[in-house]
Amino acid sequence: MTKKRNSASSSVKPTKGQKKQNLDDLKKEVEFDEHKIDLNELLVRLQTDVTKGLSDERARQVLERDGPNALSPPKTTPEWIKFCKNLFGGFAMLLWTGAFLCFFAYGITVASYDDAPKDNLWLGVALSVVVVLTGVFSYFQEAKSSRIMDSFKNMVPQQAVAVRNGEKRTLKAEELVVGDIIDVKFGDRVPADIRVIQAHGFKVDNSSLTGESEPCARGPEFTNENPLETKNIAFFSTNAVEGTCVGVVIRTGDRTVMGRIANLASGLDTGETPIAREIHHFINLITSVAVFLGVSFFIIAIALKYYWLDAVIFLIGIIVANVPEGLLATVTVCLTLTAKRMAKKNCLVKNLEAVETLGSTSTICSDKTGTLTQNRMTVAHMWYDNHIAEIDTSENQVSSTFDKDAAGLRALIRCAMLCNRAEFKLDAENLKRPILQRECIGDASESALLKSCELSFGGVAQYRELNRKIIEIPFNSTNKFQVSVHETDDDDERYLLVMKGAPERILDKCTTIYVNGSDLEMTEYWKAQFNNAYLELGGYGERVLGFCDVRL
């Protein structure tokens, strides 16, 4: 695959004395000892507890002391400066120069002649009107897109699961404080710098921080004096790609390693867009040609004994004549029309000049979950006893056609209930809501399974209490399955192992298939039936999970 890339320059412009300060900040970046000291000593220092977490009062005090867990936004350009850039920047400046020369020429003719022609006056007014209208138009177009983009920042706030007063709560990430005990699982973004207390196959993607492309294992072990290298620290903004962990927050906001790097990088100049560079080059070319021709003809006019005032007006006329007055309006209208066409396809353009750059783009990479979708999932179909059942996602399930007493369905629901880490938030207000509208602690897929089981059969929490979990292997992107082992509330004293994951991985590990209450040998026929159902459900654009169990 070939990709076209546009080069973009960036530079850092430090002020006097800032280089030394930046160097000191870089040194401070790795000067902390939270990864070295004993865990109990760290907990005492942070006045927290592994099981109970922080009290609400202590969390409030730390939040008042340290501020919210968020990076300070970079300095924004004032609106009046943005307006002036649209009004006087780039090609507009050339038109303003032409308008000034027209007014200057008109002033000379008025001072020299009683009945001075007004051609230069009207040309100067026309140029001024064109520049003002296009500048105002560009500013409001960009301001409109910027306001919409700013509104997106609060649409999907990042959340974290923390222990407060001995109970798990889902908090906004910015409400986390030093000393909070938090859970991080596969797919989450680490909401602050944390020291890992417990980990189960936990790995993080540090590429945004260190450039390391391979997932890095994290655990409670202290392995290196350098906090960037030790395994017991997970950093803010890195992504958990495998497993789960419990950690204690040690740094928040601008005090995190990523926060310090962000502050150091805040002086970056993003450079010009390709069209801006081309316009500047064109302005320089046109200006050079206009001045050269004007001065040349001025010299010729003087040599031919023309009156000097007429020669000056002739000079100004030639320079103004070489200015393409309609180009600015044409470019602005073309870019705006393109931006509006893209807006109809739900693509917002923050900077009109960026439209031209899109013409050189061959590949656009985008996250799917939460960007192209809302990350709200529901169970739509189930395959058991060799048929596909369609699930009604309304509260009363009026159109559901499946038999809730079917043995295959009950076996499937048992796996979905037990091999599942999602749970409903325990606050009273949340539990009063309809099941499909309740907020859950857990990822989208497991939350959808939890709601479906609760809606169809109810009592998921009680069922889990009766079938206590003994051990678990969390889902990870390498194995593509999750396993848990449970005690059961039936007469069978053996443990029950339940597994869910990618259908092809589940199929590979099974020797029998449960159909209509009987265990049948996994023959080529049943494998074909399984794969056909898998492909059919996948063809609906749905995420498909397989389930299995075995007695130990």
Image: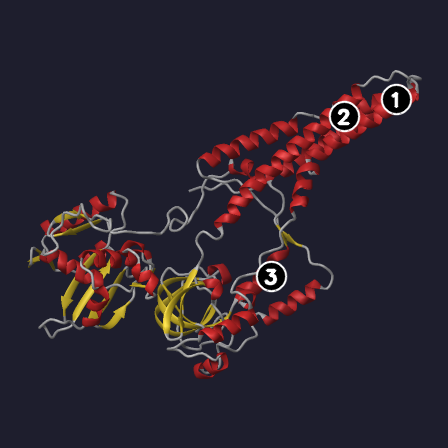
Q: Residue at x 66, y 38 (%)?
A: 86
Which amino acid type corresponds to the residue marked 2 in the rendered image? Answer: Gly
Q: Position of residue 363 (x, y in %)?
A: 45, 42
Q: Which residue position is annotated with label 2?
A: 124
Coloration of the structure image: secondary structure
Task: State which quadrant residue 66 falls in.
Answer: bottom right
* Label 1 – label 3 distance at C-alpha: 57 Å
Q: Dot 1: what SS? A: helix
Q: Which residue position is annotated with label 1?
A: 110
Which class describes the residues within 10 Å of circle 3: few (<14), some (14-19), or many (20+)? some
Task: State which quadrant residue 141 falls in.
Answer: top right
- Sooner in the amino-acid sequence: mark 3 or mark 2: 2
| Pick the front one: 472 or 43 | 43
Q: Dot 3: what SS? A: helix
Q: Residue at x 72, y 64 (%)?
A: 17
Q: Position of residue 397 (x, y in %)?
A: 20, 49
Q: Is residue 262 above or below residue 301?
A: below
* Label 3 – label 2 distance at C-alpha: 46 Å
- The quadrant of the picture occupied by the C terminus is bottom left
- Sooner in the amino-acid sequence: mark 2 or mark 1: 1
- The quadrant of the picture occupied by the N terminus is top left
- Sooner in the amino-acid sequence: mark 1 or mark 3: 1
The answer to whether residue 248 is left or right of residue 87 is left
| Pick the front one: 215 or 190 | 190
Which amino acid type corresponds to the residue marked 3 in the rendered image? Answer: Asn
Q: Which residue position is annotated with label 3?
A: 263
* Label 2 – label 1 distance at C-alpha: 15 Å
Q: Is residue 317 above or below residue 241?
A: above
